[in-house]
Image: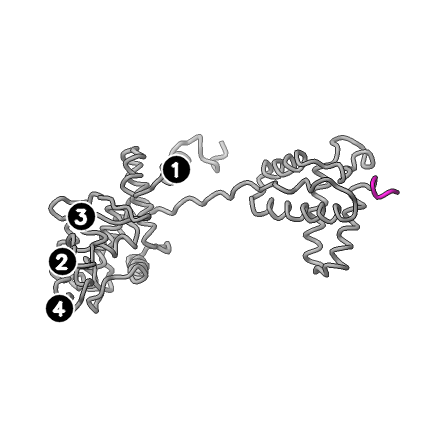
Amino acid sequence: MDDAAAPASSLIAQYLSFLRSQRKLSPHTLSGYARDLQELRALLAVPGASPDAGEPLLQQVTQVQIRKCAARLHARGLNARSISRKLSAWRGLFAWLALEQAMRANPVDGIKPPKKSKPLPKALPADDAIRLVSQVDPARDPASTLAACNRAMFELLYSSGLRVSELVGIDVADVREGSYESAGWIDLAEAEVTVTGKGGKKRKVPVGKAALQAINDWLPLRASLVKADGGTDGHALFLNERGARMSPRVTQLRLNAHAKGVGMPADVHPHMLRHSFASHVLQSSGDLRAVQEMLGHASISATQVYTALDFQRLAQVYDQAHPRARKNSGK
């Protein structure tokens, strides 16, 4: 049979032989290629035709057909990574075929897999978030400097939805000395905090009553850590035991250790409190624009992810509460 009229099954076999002998691919890799290429053959086959009549001619495959094949895979629920792998295998087949026979273009070129869906942010239920930031680790002295600092940081993270980098950049006041200028500061009288977010943009965010109280409890203990020659670190709202400005990494480690100390099962990190803040404010107010402004998102699309998170929570409540929604009810 003329190669120009060779069916897909024959050409795929030749291509796999080429990969085995010339590319020296492992049997495991070849097996993966074979599965992906046979799937292409099946997707291109004429529905309802006999095996011989239904064999597609690869030389005649168009980009439109490849798009339809990729769309069918997506409709079956195949994830973006798997579709991308199959497209890569198909692209290689047609590139080889172009070298063996005259083809005007590779029909897979320019075909991209669907975008990977971004996982929803992990937010704590409201009761868990409150328990996390308000409880004192039983292993620590509630009156200790460390416990007071931790509570003030955690309360502020949850109260105002701050990034951890924004949190550690806060000073006790707006300071401008020489070349130093505060990136952020707390205003207890106005119950608000000013921070510098991404892109160097400053924003003001309200601070809740519980966070204000925790900060007021921390400030007298903080004073004992300030060093006379501490430089600009002496302006920092949150200091470590050596009187230096708190770092994002230490804050992360402290929060994770605190979560374990109070019996939280999840691996808690500072951004989880930011997600919790956004989700809980949105649940209560429904004001997406206000949440966007408080989070410092440049685009509303970045904030809209919390509407999906809110819907997911409502769906869980519905499944648990509605007698005709329970998947395991058997009714």
Nearest to the eye among marks 1 and 2: give it.
Answer: 1
Q: Earlier in the sequence, mark 4 or mark 2?
A: 2
- Mark-to-mark CA distance, 3 and 2: 15 Å
- Badges 1 and 2: C-beta atoms under 8 Å apart? no
Nearest to the eye among marks 1 and 3: give it.
Answer: 1
Residue 308 lies in quadrant: top left
- Identity, as a three-letter code, of the amino acid under mark 4: Ala
Nearest to the eye among marks 4 and 2: give it.
Answer: 4
In the image, what residue occupies the spot 29% across and 58% down?
255
Q: Earlier in the sequence, mark 1 or mark 2?
A: 2
- Mark-to-mark CA distance, 1 and 3: 30 Å
In the image, what residue occupies the spot 19% across and 45% down?
207
Q: Which residue carries the number 3 mark?
A: 210
Q: Which residue carries the number 1 mark?
A: 301
Mark 4 neighbour density, 10 Å: few (under 14) some (14–19) many (20 or more): few
Q: Residue furthest front?
A: 178
Q: Is residue 288 above or below residue 230?
A: above
Q: Which residue carries the number 4 mark?
A: 228
Q: Position of residue 98 (x, y in %)?
A: 74, 46
Magenta stretch, residue numbers: 1-5
Q: Is residue 2 magenta?
A: yes
- Mark-to-mark CA distance, 3 and 4: 31 Å
Q: Is residue 307 above or below residue 137?
A: above
- Identity, as a three-letter code, of the amino acid under mark 2: Leu
Residue at disc 4, secondary structure: loop
Is 330 placed left or right of 197 in the picture? Answer: right
- Mark-to-mark CA distance, 1 and 2: 38 Å
Can residue 317 be seen here? Answer: no
Q: Which residue carries the number 2 mark?
A: 219
